[in-house]
Amino acid sequence: MSTDTIDLGTLGKRLARVRRAYGERIDLPKLGRTGFASLLGVSAAAYASYEHGAAEPTVAFLVALRNKTQISLDWLLDPNQPGRNRQFR
């Protein structure tokens, strides 16, 4: 993974996958951006900007995401990282 830039488009798509998969895992298959943002302690606008690829997420957000979902941050941040997201708690 390049340490210079993050592919925000791929990151946003993967965040959406994480949100949907996590929602299914906790029996909320229609978990929206606002609800997911609330679970992670960020504003809905901030989360939407991450998922749309318009802004780079903060380290605090990534830590909260990792703690809540157990997602691999390597997979999330590196567009060359193959495979699917890990199972969620």
Image: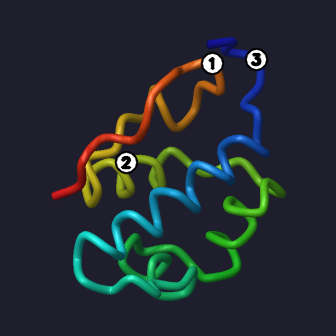
Residue placed under numbered mark 2 in the picture: 63
Q: Are marks 2 and 3 in contact (CB under 8 Å)?
A: no
Residue placed under numbered mark 1 in the picture: 80
Secondary structure beneath label 3: loop
Of mark 3 and mark 1, the one earlier in the sequence is 3
Mark 3 Cα within 10 Å, few/some/many (few <14, many 20+)?
Answer: few
The residues bearing labels 1 and 2 have C-alpha atoms spaced at a distance of: 21 Å
Scheme of colours in the image: rainbow
> Taking 50 as reference, is 16 left or right?
left
Figure disc tally: 3
Mark 1 Cα within 10 Å, few/some/many (few <14, many 20+)?
Answer: few
> Taking 87 as reference, is 31 left or right?
right
Which quarter of the image is occupied by the N terminus? Answer: top right
User: Mark 3, mark 1: which one is toward the viewer?
Assistant: 1
Which quarter of the image is occupied by the C terminus? Answer: bottom left
Residue sitting at 56 percent across and 55 percent down?
Answer: 15
Residue placed under numbered mark 3 in the picture: 4
Secondary structure beneath label 1: loop
Q: Amino acid at mark 3?
A: Asp
The residues bearing labels 3 and 1 have C-alpha atoms spaced at a distance of: 15 Å
Of mark 2 and mark 3, the one earlier in the sequence is 3
Q: Quadrant of residue 16?
A: bottom right
Of mark 1 and mark 2, the one earlier in the sequence is 2
Q: Amino acid at mark 2?
A: Val
> Taking 6 as reference, is 23 left or right?
left
- Residue 10 horizontal/vertical position (percent): 71, 41
> Taking 16 as reference, is 37 left or right?
left
Residue that protrudes farthest toward the right in the picture: 54
Residue sitting at 53 percent across and 20 percent down?
Answer: 81
